[in-house]
Amino acid sequence: MTVAYAKLGRNTGHRKAMLRNLVTSLLRDERITTTESRAKEVKRIAEKMITLAKKGDLNARRQALEYIYEEKVVRKLFDNYGPKYADRQGGYTRIIRIGYRRGDAAQLVLLELV
């Protein structure tokens, strides 16, 4: 039996809010540092948001606004990233391992837009 997503040790509401915050931060700052398991989940969602931006229509913008917290980030997504990745068929993000966290030895990664 396969699992559709990682639970990340959080209840549903907390997990969804955390992922929305991470996606918003990634699209705003173009790179974030987080744990590997979180980065893999954020990558899935961020790639979907960029795909919406490539469509560029009003419905896609509204779908992005449902998920992303900041309106400025959605504007940046549709004005900058949509045209930038227009000819690219997926693979908009990259995960780079940067070491282990000191407190609990969790694998830290840099998640950035390509």
Image (tube, helix red, strand yellow):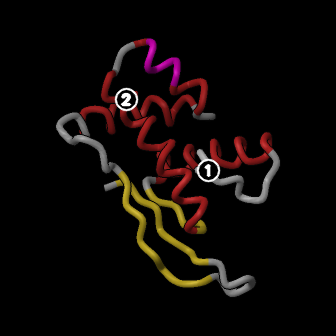
Front-lying residue, 20 or 6: 6
Q: Answer with left or right where residue 112 lies relative to residue 38.
A: left
User: Which residue is disc 2 drawn over?
Assistant: 53
Quadrant of the image containing the C terminus:
bottom left
Q: Residues under labels 2 and 1: Cα distance?
A: 33 Å
The region drawn magenta spans 59-63
Mark 2 vs mark 1: in front: 1
Label 1 element class:
loop
Which numbered circle lies on residue 1? 1
Identity of the residue drawn at 31% across and 50% down: 91
Q: How far across and how far down the image is residue 15, in percent?
A: 73, 47
Label 2 element class:
helix
Q: How far across and how far down the image is residue 24, in percent?
A: 56, 43
Q: How far across and how far down the image is residue 77, in percent?
A: 41, 35
Determine whether 17 is above or below 9 in the image: above
Front-lying residue, 40 or 19: 40
Other residues around mark 2 within 10 Å, as few (<14) / some (14–19) / many (≥20): many
| Among the 4 quarters of the image, the one containing residue 52 | top left
Whether the magenta-drawn stretch holds residue 50 is answered as no
Which numbered circle lies on residue 93? none
> Which residue in the rendered view is the most extreme toward the left?
87
Query: What is the magenta segment's predominant secondary structure?
Result: helix
Q: Answer with left or right where residue 87 lies relative to residue 48.
A: left
Q: Answer with left or right where residue 60 lies relative to residue 10.
A: left
Identity of the residue drawn at 17% across and 37% down: 87
| Among the 4 quarters of the image, the one containing residue 105 | bottom right
Kind of residue indicated by mark 2: Ala
Identity of the residue drawn at 37% across and 29% down: 53
Kind of residue indicated by mark 1: Met
